[in-house]
Amino acid sequence: MRLPVTLFAALLCTPLLADTADLTDVLNAASGADPEWAAAQRTLDADQQLATQGRSALLPSLTASYNLTRSYREFEGQSDETQFTSETAGLTLVQPLFRPDTWYSNSQGKALSNAGEARFEEARQNFLLRVTERYLDVLRRGEDLQTAQAEERALSRQLEQTQERFDVGLVPVTDVEEAKAAYDLSRVGLIVAQADFDISRDQLEALTGKSWGKLAGLREELPMAGPEPAAPSHWMERARSNNPQILASRYEADIAKATAKQRTSAQLPSVNLVGRYEVVDFSNVDTPTPLPLGSTQFLGYDGKSIGIEASLPLFAGGGLNSQRKEASYRYQAAEEVYRLVWRDVGQSAQSLARQVAASAQNVMARKQALRSAESALRATESGYEVGTRNVVDVLTAQRNLYANQRDYSAARYDYIIVSLRLQAAAGDLSTDDIDRINAWLSSDASVELATPESSP
């Protein structure tokens, strides 16, 4: 089904501050600004016409014709040339009676239309996934930037403290150099994080066609428990039944099959019921004597005819037989492509289900590792104060803490993305899933989108 703009507006969302945009707002903007999505909608409109075109081959056709001719003739026994103008107007009605190729054209048109709808469904899910990934990538890069800023501030303070200790002779100069090296590395990380954030923000703005002030961020506590149901085989079978890529491939094989039969039937007889109505008028006759068609000049006539026309192609230079073979081979190839897509999409869904389960465990493990890193830093700083640890130990613990913060943040976003990809692989990704993700957002965790000129 088509995904209208108003459907996005109907998505439920957590109440947010007026100046904080959420995933629903971004989807609404992208639905009216993304050329790829607009192209998918227009392509669907075009594909839906294919079924009508295929069916039209079975229905009557009516053709109007008109001909204006100026003739110059010389008759035996006449010295002068005869000149006259003729006008011919006609209607021809053709109703196929026995045309096997038209029956397969009808089947081909239906399969083409069905394949177009399946491809549109795939484009719809890709659109939802693409916009959500862009949104979450901005949040991820924003958290990475905040972590890099916090790391740079912490190592700057550590450098100042170490310098003060060196000035009063409590630590050797090597501690100062170690602290300075760590601080310099944090500056490099901050520059990279700022660039990544700017790029991600620019990509979101290009997709939506507008700039954003704030984006609602992820809540801290989220239900990340793994796929439901948990069995990977369930997702494999689900994907093989519902995935639009598989459905489109099946319809494309049906198209190739109908084409092959059409090419074969093109060598059979065709029978049409044909009716004609024709009006002929001769005027402007320029001749010294009556035309030799009777005692008076021939001025025109009205004609009606109805009959059966049959035709049978006998020989076309081998082209018809070659087209039949070509279509047969293409059908066989399309069947193999379908088998390949059926296998790969099912396997991909199974793998994604395993990734979702692993990602859920990874989030919990990263969260525990972050707690451990915080405890380790506090213990190391305490040891440094009493002289049992040196500055290198403190710097290492600090870097480890911020690395764990980045890993924990990445694990949360990876879980959401891989979960949505699993739903898309199963052919079930819908606005309900986007609504669920939108409910995980909060203005309290909003990310400020700086101007492009901002720098660390």
Image: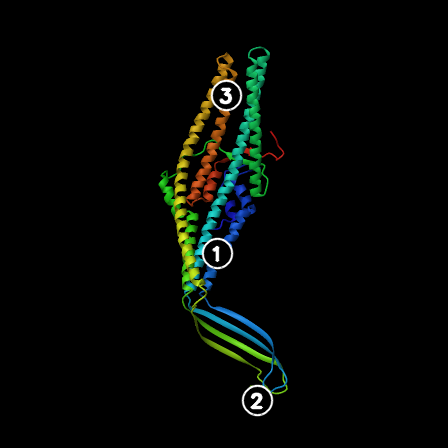
* Kind of residue at badge 3: Thr
Residue 87's quadrant in the figure? bottom right
Tell me which numbered mark, 1 or 3, is placed earlier along the sequence.
Answer: 1
Residue 104's spot in the image, x, y percent?
42, 61
Is residue 71 shown left or right of residue 129? right
Q: CA distance from mark 1 to mark 3?
A: 62 Å
Q: Nearer the viewer, mark 2 or mark 1?
A: 2
Q: Which residue is mark 3?
A: 396
- Residue 295, label in figure: 2
**Toward the viewer: 370 or 320?**
320
Residue at the bottom extreme of this rendering = 295
Contact (CB < 8 A) between labels 1 and 3?
A: no
Question: Callout 1: 10 Å neighbours few (<14), some, many (20+)?
Answer: some
Q: Nearer the viewer, mark 2 or mark 3?
A: 2
Q: CA distance from mark 2 to mark 3?
A: 120 Å
Tell me which numbered mark, 2 or 3, is placed earlier along the sequence.
Answer: 2
Q: Which residue is mark 1?
A: 48
* Kind of residue at badge 1: Gln
